[in-house]
Image (cartoon, grey):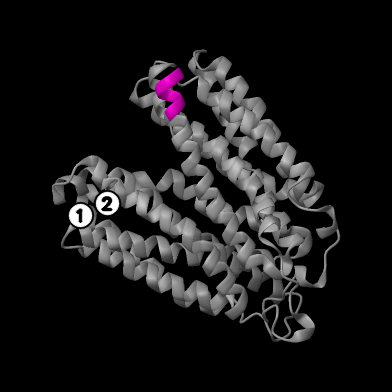
Amino acid sequence: MRASRADHVPLSTEPLSPAQAPTRRGGALAVGFITLLVVGTDLFVVSPLLPAISRHFRVSPGAAGNAVTVFSIVYVLGAPAFGSLADRIGRRKVLAAGLVGFAVANVLTGLAPSFAVLLLARVLAGLTAAAVSPSVYALVGAAAPAHRRGVWMSTAVAGFLISLTTGAPSGTALAAVWGWRAVFVILALPAAALAVVNLAVWPDMPRPGASAATAPVPIGLLTRARAVAVTGLWAFAVYALYTYLGTGLRTDAKLSTGPVALALIVFGVGAVAGSFGGGRLADRFGARGVATASLALVGVMMLLLDLVVRAPVPLLMIALFLFALCAYPCLPAYQAQLVSSFPQHGGSLLAWNSSCMYLGTALGSAAGSALLSMAGFRAIPLAGAAVAFLGAFFCAFWAISRKSE
Protein backbone atom coordinates (compact mmCIF):
# COMPACT_ATOMS: atom_id res chain seq x y z
CA MET A 1 0.00 0.00 0.00
CA ARG A 2 1.46 3.32 -0.99
CA ALA A 3 1.58 6.13 1.57
CA SER A 4 0.94 9.67 0.38
CA ARG A 5 2.40 12.76 1.98
CA ALA A 6 -0.95 13.40 3.61
CA ASP A 7 -0.81 10.04 5.37
CA HIS A 8 1.58 11.39 7.98
CA VAL A 9 1.31 14.74 9.71
CA PRO A 10 4.12 15.63 12.12
CA LEU A 11 3.26 16.14 15.74
CA SER A 12 4.78 19.60 15.94
CA THR A 13 5.21 22.66 13.83
CA GLU A 14 8.74 22.92 15.25
CA PRO A 15 11.47 20.48 14.27
CA LEU A 16 11.93 17.57 16.63
CA SER A 17 15.14 15.65 17.05
CA PRO A 18 15.01 11.89 16.36
CA ALA A 19 15.11 11.28 20.09
CA GLN A 20 12.27 13.70 20.86
CA ALA A 21 9.81 12.66 18.14
CA PRO A 22 8.93 9.14 19.40
CA THR A 23 8.45 10.45 22.95
CA ARG A 24 6.12 13.26 21.82
CA ARG A 25 4.11 10.92 19.64
CA GLY A 26 3.91 8.24 22.33
CA GLY A 27 2.61 10.80 24.83
CA ALA A 28 -0.11 11.90 22.41
CA LEU A 29 -1.12 8.30 21.77
CA ALA A 30 -1.35 7.64 25.51
CA VAL A 31 -3.60 10.67 25.95
CA GLY A 32 -5.81 9.46 23.09
CA PHE A 33 -6.04 6.04 24.75
CA ILE A 34 -7.08 7.55 28.10
CA THR A 35 -9.58 9.89 26.43
CA LEU A 36 -11.40 7.01 24.74
CA LEU A 37 -11.26 5.02 27.99
CA VAL A 38 -13.10 7.83 29.81
CA VAL A 39 -15.70 8.30 27.06
CA GLY A 40 -16.28 4.55 26.81
CA THR A 41 -16.64 4.23 30.57
CA ASP A 42 -19.38 6.87 30.52
CA LEU A 43 -21.23 4.86 27.88
CA PHE A 44 -20.98 1.47 29.58
CA VAL A 45 -21.44 2.65 33.16
CA VAL A 46 -25.05 3.72 32.62
CA SER A 47 -26.60 0.26 32.24
CA PRO A 48 -25.78 -1.07 35.73
CA LEU A 49 -26.96 2.23 37.24
CA LEU A 50 -30.38 2.15 35.56
CA PRO A 51 -32.14 0.32 38.44
CA ALA A 52 -30.97 3.00 40.91
CA ILE A 53 -31.96 5.78 38.50
CA SER A 54 -35.36 4.15 37.99
CA ARG A 55 -35.99 3.98 41.75
CA HIS A 56 -34.75 7.51 42.40
CA PHE A 57 -36.99 9.20 39.82
CA ARG A 58 -39.84 6.68 40.21
CA VAL A 59 -39.94 5.73 36.54
CA SER A 60 -40.19 2.27 35.01
CA PRO A 61 -37.02 0.36 34.09
CA GLY A 62 -38.02 0.69 30.44
CA ALA A 63 -38.30 4.47 30.76
CA ALA A 64 -34.95 4.63 32.55
CA GLY A 65 -33.44 2.75 29.60
CA ASN A 66 -34.19 5.78 27.43
CA ALA A 67 -31.09 7.35 29.00
CA VAL A 68 -29.04 4.89 26.93
CA THR A 69 -31.27 5.16 23.85
CA VAL A 70 -31.11 8.95 23.50
CA PHE A 71 -27.31 8.91 23.93
CA SER A 72 -26.93 6.43 21.06
CA ILE A 73 -29.40 8.16 18.72
CA VAL A 74 -27.78 11.57 19.16
CA TYR A 75 -24.32 10.07 18.69
CA VAL A 76 -25.33 8.44 15.40
CA LEU A 77 -26.83 11.67 14.09
CA GLY A 78 -24.17 14.03 15.43
CA ALA A 79 -20.89 12.30 14.59
CA PRO A 80 -20.92 12.97 10.80
CA ALA A 81 -21.58 16.68 11.34
CA PHE A 82 -18.79 17.00 13.89
CA GLY A 83 -16.43 15.02 11.67
CA SER A 84 -16.97 17.43 8.79
CA LEU A 85 -16.59 20.39 11.15
CA ALA A 86 -13.31 18.96 12.46
CA ASP A 87 -11.95 18.62 8.91
CA ARG A 88 -12.80 22.29 8.30
CA ILE A 89 -11.74 24.06 11.50
CA GLY A 90 -9.31 21.58 13.06
CA ARG A 91 -9.74 18.28 14.92
CA ARG A 92 -7.87 19.49 17.99
CA LYS A 93 -10.35 22.34 18.57
CA VAL A 94 -13.40 20.12 18.12
CA LEU A 95 -11.90 17.51 20.45
CA ALA A 96 -11.21 20.01 23.23
CA ALA A 97 -14.64 21.64 22.93
CA GLY A 98 -16.28 18.23 22.92
CA LEU A 99 -14.50 17.20 26.14
CA VAL A 100 -15.58 20.40 27.89
CA GLY A 101 -19.17 19.77 26.84
CA PHE A 102 -18.85 16.12 27.86
CA ALA A 103 -17.73 17.17 31.36
CA VAL A 104 -20.66 19.59 31.64
CA ALA A 105 -23.08 16.87 30.51
CA ASN A 106 -21.85 14.48 33.19
CA VAL A 107 -22.11 17.09 35.95
CA LEU A 108 -25.64 17.87 34.76
CA THR A 109 -26.46 14.14 34.77
CA GLY A 110 -25.20 13.76 38.31
CA LEU A 111 -27.08 16.83 39.59
CA ALA A 112 -30.29 16.40 37.55
CA PRO A 113 -33.32 17.40 39.67
CA SER A 114 -35.74 15.46 37.46
CA PHE A 115 -35.72 12.60 34.98
CA ALA A 116 -36.46 15.00 32.12
CA VAL A 117 -33.32 16.99 32.94
CA LEU A 118 -31.34 13.76 33.13
CA LEU A 119 -32.49 12.80 29.63
CA LEU A 120 -31.45 16.22 28.33
CA ALA A 121 -28.07 15.72 29.98
CA ARG A 122 -27.65 12.36 28.24
CA VAL A 123 -28.56 14.01 24.91
CA LEU A 124 -25.74 16.49 25.52
CA ALA A 125 -23.41 13.65 26.53
CA GLY A 126 -24.13 11.76 23.31
CA LEU A 127 -23.70 14.90 21.21
CA THR A 128 -20.34 15.79 22.76
CA ALA A 129 -19.11 12.19 22.67
CA ALA A 130 -19.82 12.33 18.93
CA ALA A 131 -17.35 15.22 18.76
CA VAL A 132 -14.70 13.48 20.87
CA SER A 133 -14.29 9.90 19.68
CA PRO A 134 -13.99 10.46 15.89
CA SER A 135 -11.63 13.39 16.50
CA VAL A 136 -9.32 11.21 18.58
CA TYR A 137 -9.32 8.47 15.94
CA ALA A 138 -8.60 11.01 13.19
CA LEU A 139 -5.76 12.66 15.14
CA VAL A 140 -4.21 9.30 15.96
CA GLY A 141 -4.48 8.12 12.36
CA ALA A 142 -2.99 11.34 10.96
CA ALA A 143 -0.14 11.51 13.48
CA ALA A 144 0.88 7.86 13.28
CA PRO A 145 3.92 6.88 11.22
CA ALA A 146 2.55 5.27 8.06
CA HIS A 147 4.25 1.93 8.78
CA ARG A 148 2.74 1.79 12.31
CA ARG A 149 -0.73 3.20 11.70
CA GLY A 150 -2.41 -0.12 12.48
CA VAL A 151 -0.69 -0.37 15.87
CA TRP A 152 -1.64 3.21 16.72
CA MET A 153 -5.28 2.72 15.73
CA SER A 154 -5.47 -0.56 17.67
CA THR A 155 -4.08 1.15 20.78
CA ALA A 156 -6.72 3.88 20.56
CA VAL A 157 -9.50 1.33 20.00
CA ALA A 158 -8.22 -0.68 22.98
CA GLY A 159 -8.93 2.28 25.24
CA PHE A 160 -12.58 2.07 24.25
CA LEU A 161 -12.69 -1.74 24.46
CA ILE A 162 -11.12 -1.87 27.91
CA SER A 163 -13.90 0.40 29.13
CA LEU A 164 -16.31 -2.36 28.04
CA THR A 165 -14.96 -4.62 30.79
CA THR A 166 -14.09 -1.97 33.39
CA GLY A 167 -16.91 0.56 33.06
CA ALA A 168 -19.76 -1.47 34.51
CA PRO A 169 -17.95 -2.95 37.53
CA SER A 170 -16.17 0.29 38.45
CA GLY A 171 -19.41 2.28 38.20
CA THR A 172 -21.27 -0.28 40.31
CA ALA A 173 -18.55 -0.16 42.98
CA LEU A 174 -18.54 3.64 43.12
CA ALA A 175 -22.34 3.80 43.23
CA ALA A 176 -22.40 1.35 46.14
CA VAL A 177 -20.19 3.72 48.16
CA TRP A 178 -21.28 7.21 47.09
CA GLY A 179 -24.49 6.72 45.10
CA TRP A 180 -25.18 6.79 41.37
CA ARG A 181 -24.98 10.60 41.09
CA ALA A 182 -21.36 10.65 42.24
CA VAL A 183 -20.33 8.35 39.38
CA PHE A 184 -21.16 10.95 36.74
CA VAL A 185 -19.65 13.85 38.68
CA ILE A 186 -16.43 11.86 39.14
CA LEU A 187 -16.30 11.09 35.39
CA ALA A 188 -16.57 14.79 34.64
CA LEU A 189 -13.26 15.50 36.36
CA PRO A 190 -10.94 13.56 34.02
CA ALA A 191 -12.97 14.72 31.02
CA ALA A 192 -12.36 18.37 31.91
CA ALA A 193 -8.68 17.73 32.59
CA LEU A 194 -8.30 15.88 29.30
CA ALA A 195 -9.64 18.89 27.39
CA VAL A 196 -6.56 20.82 28.51
CA VAL A 197 -4.17 17.91 28.07
CA ASN A 198 -5.35 17.17 24.54
CA LEU A 199 -4.82 20.80 23.56
CA ALA A 200 -1.26 20.50 24.83
CA VAL A 201 -0.23 17.21 23.24
CA TRP A 202 -1.85 17.51 19.81
CA PRO A 203 -0.48 20.20 17.50
CA ASP A 204 -2.60 22.70 15.61
CA MET A 205 -2.27 20.59 12.48
CA PRO A 206 -2.60 22.24 9.08
CA ARG A 207 -6.07 21.60 7.75
CA PRO A 208 -6.74 19.99 4.41
CA GLY A 209 -8.30 22.64 2.22
CA ALA A 210 -6.50 25.54 3.88
CA SER A 211 -5.62 26.79 0.39
CA ALA A 212 -6.83 26.17 -3.13
CA ALA A 213 -3.72 24.12 -3.87
CA THR A 214 -4.45 21.70 -1.03
CA ALA A 215 -8.26 21.65 -1.23
CA PRO A 216 -9.49 18.08 -0.85
CA VAL A 217 -11.44 16.52 -3.69
CA PRO A 218 -15.04 16.04 -2.48
CA ILE A 219 -16.25 12.48 -2.03
CA GLY A 220 -19.84 11.56 -2.73
CA LEU A 221 -22.47 10.16 -0.41
CA LEU A 222 -22.36 6.73 -2.09
CA THR A 223 -18.59 6.54 -1.66
CA ARG A 224 -18.91 7.41 2.03
CA ALA A 225 -21.71 4.89 2.56
CA ARG A 226 -19.76 2.13 0.82
CA ALA A 227 -16.66 2.91 2.83
CA VAL A 228 -18.33 2.65 6.23
CA ALA A 229 -20.80 -0.16 5.45
CA VAL A 230 -18.16 -2.73 6.41
CA THR A 231 -18.05 -1.45 10.00
CA GLY A 232 -21.84 -1.46 10.19
CA LEU A 233 -22.00 -5.09 9.06
CA TRP A 234 -19.24 -6.02 11.52
CA ALA A 235 -21.06 -4.34 14.41
CA PHE A 236 -24.38 -5.93 13.41
CA ALA A 237 -22.86 -9.43 13.45
CA VAL A 238 -20.81 -9.06 16.63
CA TYR A 239 -23.31 -7.20 18.79
CA ALA A 240 -26.37 -9.16 17.71
CA LEU A 241 -24.61 -12.00 19.52
CA TYR A 242 -22.88 -10.10 22.33
CA THR A 243 -26.04 -8.27 23.46
CA TYR A 244 -27.77 -11.56 24.21
CA LEU A 245 -24.72 -13.64 25.07
CA GLY A 246 -25.50 -13.58 28.79
CA THR A 247 -29.07 -14.68 28.08
CA GLY A 248 -27.94 -17.51 25.82
CA LEU A 249 -25.36 -18.74 28.31
CA ARG A 250 -28.09 -19.01 30.93
CA THR A 251 -30.87 -20.50 28.78
CA ASP A 252 -28.94 -22.74 26.39
CA ALA A 253 -25.60 -23.38 28.09
CA LYS A 254 -27.33 -23.59 31.53
CA LEU A 255 -24.60 -21.57 33.23
CA SER A 256 -25.09 -19.91 36.61
CA THR A 257 -24.28 -16.28 37.37
CA GLY A 258 -20.61 -16.85 38.23
CA PRO A 259 -19.66 -18.71 35.02
CA VAL A 260 -21.65 -16.20 32.93
CA ALA A 261 -19.67 -13.34 34.44
CA LEU A 262 -16.43 -15.24 33.81
CA ALA A 263 -17.45 -15.88 30.21
CA LEU A 264 -18.03 -12.15 29.64
CA ILE A 265 -14.62 -11.38 31.13
CA VAL A 266 -13.00 -13.98 28.88
CA PHE A 267 -14.74 -12.36 25.90
CA GLY A 268 -13.47 -8.93 26.95
CA VAL A 269 -9.89 -10.17 27.29
CA GLY A 270 -10.10 -11.72 23.83
CA ALA A 271 -11.48 -8.47 22.42
CA VAL A 272 -8.61 -6.37 23.79
CA ALA A 273 -6.01 -8.91 22.64
CA GLY A 274 -7.61 -9.06 19.22
CA SER A 275 -7.60 -5.28 18.89
CA PHE A 276 -3.90 -4.98 19.74
CA GLY A 277 -3.01 -7.92 17.51
CA GLY A 278 -5.09 -6.58 14.64
CA GLY A 279 -3.07 -3.38 14.49
CA ARG A 280 0.21 -5.22 14.24
CA LEU A 281 -1.16 -7.59 11.61
CA ALA A 282 -2.51 -4.65 9.59
CA ASP A 283 0.92 -2.99 9.55
CA ARG A 284 2.53 -6.20 8.41
CA PHE A 285 0.02 -7.68 5.97
CA GLY A 286 -2.19 -4.75 4.94
CA ALA A 287 -5.26 -3.26 6.60
CA ARG A 288 -7.82 -4.39 4.02
CA GLY A 289 -6.65 -8.00 4.11
CA VAL A 290 -6.70 -8.15 7.92
CA ALA A 291 -10.18 -6.60 8.13
CA THR A 292 -11.49 -9.04 5.50
CA ALA A 293 -9.93 -12.05 7.23
CA SER A 294 -11.30 -10.93 10.59
CA LEU A 295 -14.85 -10.72 9.23
CA ALA A 296 -14.57 -14.11 7.56
CA LEU A 297 -13.29 -15.64 10.82
CA VAL A 298 -16.18 -14.03 12.69
CA GLY A 299 -18.53 -15.99 10.45
CA VAL A 300 -16.61 -19.23 11.03
CA MET A 301 -16.45 -18.73 14.81
CA MET A 302 -20.17 -17.94 15.00
CA LEU A 303 -20.95 -21.23 13.31
CA LEU A 304 -18.62 -22.94 15.78
CA LEU A 305 -20.28 -21.23 18.75
CA ASP A 306 -23.65 -22.46 17.57
CA LEU A 307 -22.26 -25.99 17.78
CA VAL A 308 -20.50 -25.73 21.16
CA VAL A 309 -22.99 -23.62 23.14
CA ARG A 310 -23.95 -26.76 25.08
CA ALA A 311 -20.44 -28.18 25.23
CA PRO A 312 -18.42 -28.47 28.48
CA VAL A 313 -17.67 -25.08 30.03
CA PRO A 314 -13.90 -25.04 29.31
CA LEU A 315 -14.52 -25.66 25.61
CA LEU A 316 -17.19 -22.96 25.52
CA MET A 317 -14.86 -20.48 27.22
CA ILE A 318 -12.12 -21.21 24.68
CA ALA A 319 -14.58 -20.71 21.82
CA LEU A 320 -15.72 -17.34 23.23
CA PHE A 321 -12.13 -16.17 23.65
CA LEU A 322 -11.25 -17.20 20.08
CA PHE A 323 -14.39 -15.54 18.73
CA ALA A 324 -13.46 -12.19 20.31
CA LEU A 325 -9.81 -12.64 19.34
CA CYS A 326 -10.85 -13.10 15.69
CA ALA A 327 -13.54 -10.39 15.70
CA TYR A 328 -11.78 -7.34 17.10
CA PRO A 329 -8.83 -7.00 14.71
CA CYS A 330 -11.36 -5.77 12.15
CA LEU A 331 -12.14 -2.39 13.71
CA PRO A 332 -8.62 -0.90 14.09
CA ALA A 333 -7.47 -2.43 10.81
CA TYR A 334 -10.40 -0.98 8.89
CA GLN A 335 -10.01 2.43 10.54
CA ALA A 336 -6.37 2.42 9.44
CA GLN A 337 -7.59 1.59 5.92
CA LEU A 338 -9.97 4.55 5.94
CA VAL A 339 -7.26 6.97 7.08
CA SER A 340 -4.87 5.67 4.43
CA SER A 341 -7.42 5.73 1.62
CA PHE A 342 -8.99 9.10 2.48
CA PRO A 343 -6.29 11.13 4.28
CA GLN A 344 -7.92 14.50 3.53
CA HIS A 345 -11.30 13.37 4.83
CA GLY A 346 -10.08 11.41 7.86
CA GLY A 347 -12.20 13.24 10.44
CA SER A 348 -15.47 13.01 8.55
CA LEU A 349 -14.97 9.41 7.36
CA LEU A 350 -14.06 8.16 10.83
CA ALA A 351 -17.07 10.02 12.21
CA TRP A 352 -19.32 8.35 9.65
CA ASN A 353 -17.63 5.08 10.58
CA SER A 354 -18.43 5.61 14.28
CA SER A 355 -22.05 6.41 13.46
CA CYS A 356 -22.33 3.33 11.30
CA MET A 357 -20.88 1.21 14.11
CA TYR A 358 -23.51 2.49 16.54
CA LEU A 359 -26.23 2.01 13.94
CA GLY A 360 -25.06 -1.52 13.21
CA THR A 361 -24.98 -2.25 16.95
CA ALA A 362 -28.54 -0.99 17.39
CA LEU A 363 -29.87 -2.91 14.38
CA GLY A 364 -27.99 -6.03 15.41
CA SER A 365 -29.43 -5.84 18.92
CA ALA A 366 -32.93 -5.41 17.51
CA ALA A 367 -32.47 -8.35 15.14
CA GLY A 368 -31.07 -10.45 17.96
CA SER A 369 -34.10 -9.67 20.10
CA ALA A 370 -36.47 -10.72 17.32
CA LEU A 371 -34.55 -13.94 16.64
CA LEU A 372 -34.38 -14.76 20.35
CA SER A 373 -38.15 -14.48 20.73
CA MET A 374 -39.02 -16.31 17.50
CA ALA A 375 -36.39 -19.04 17.18
CA GLY A 376 -34.24 -19.04 20.30
CA PHE A 377 -30.66 -18.01 21.01
CA ARG A 378 -29.00 -20.44 18.59
CA ALA A 379 -30.56 -18.63 15.62
CA ILE A 380 -28.54 -15.50 16.47
CA PRO A 381 -25.04 -16.82 15.65
CA LEU A 382 -26.34 -18.34 12.41
CA ALA A 383 -27.74 -14.98 11.27
CA GLY A 384 -24.61 -13.19 12.51
CA ALA A 385 -22.40 -15.55 10.51
CA ALA A 386 -24.30 -14.72 7.31
CA VAL A 387 -23.87 -10.98 7.92
CA ALA A 388 -20.17 -11.41 8.74
CA PHE A 389 -19.50 -13.31 5.51
CA LEU A 390 -21.34 -10.57 3.61
CA GLY A 391 -19.15 -7.99 5.33
CA ALA A 392 -16.00 -9.88 4.35
CA PHE A 393 -17.12 -9.87 0.71
CA PHE A 394 -17.89 -6.14 0.81
CA CYS A 395 -14.55 -5.38 2.44
CA ALA A 396 -12.57 -7.35 -0.11
CA PHE A 397 -14.30 -6.29 -3.33
CA TRP A 398 -16.67 -3.35 -2.92
CA ALA A 399 -16.23 -1.01 0.04
CA ILE A 400 -13.18 1.04 -1.03
CA SER A 401 -11.90 1.34 -4.56
CA ARG A 402 -8.40 -0.01 -5.08
CA LYS A 403 -7.58 3.33 -6.77
CA SER A 404 -7.87 5.00 -3.33
CA GLU A 405 -4.97 2.94 -1.94
Expressed as whole percent of the image width and height from the top left, the position of residue 290 reads 74, 43
Which residue is depicted at the point 56% across and 44% down? 272
Q: Is residue 144 visible?
A: yes
Left or right of 47, for residue 279: right
Q: Return the residue nearer the eye: 117 or 283.
A: 117
Taking 16 as reference, is 319 above or below it? above
Taking 186 as reference, is 254 above or below it? above
Expressed as whole percent of the image width and height from the top left, the position of residue 365 reads 46, 37
Q: Return the residue nearer the eye: 222 or 112.
A: 222
Taking 166 as reference, is 346 above or below it? below
Badge 1 is on which residue?
A: 178
Which residue is depicted at the point 19% across and 42% down? 60
The three-letter code of the residue at mark 1 reads Trp
Q: Return the residue nearer the eye: 123 or 111.
A: 123
* Image: magenta residue range: 370-375
Left or right of 261, for residue 280: right
In the rendering, which numbered label is found on residue 285? Answer: none
The three-letter code of the residue at mark 2 reads Leu
Secondary structure under tag 1 reads helix
Expressed as whole percent of the image width and height from the top left, the position of residue 180 reads 23, 53
Q: Can residue 319 be seen in this view?
A: no
Q: In which quarter of the image is the N terminus?
A: bottom right
Which residue is depicted at the point 51% across and 72% down? 95
Expressed as whole percent of the image width and height from the top left, the position of residue 402 reads 84, 53
Q: Return the residue nearer the eye: 137 or 404.
A: 404
Badge 2 is on which residue?
A: 174
Q: Is the magenta stretch mostly helix, strand or loop?
A: helix
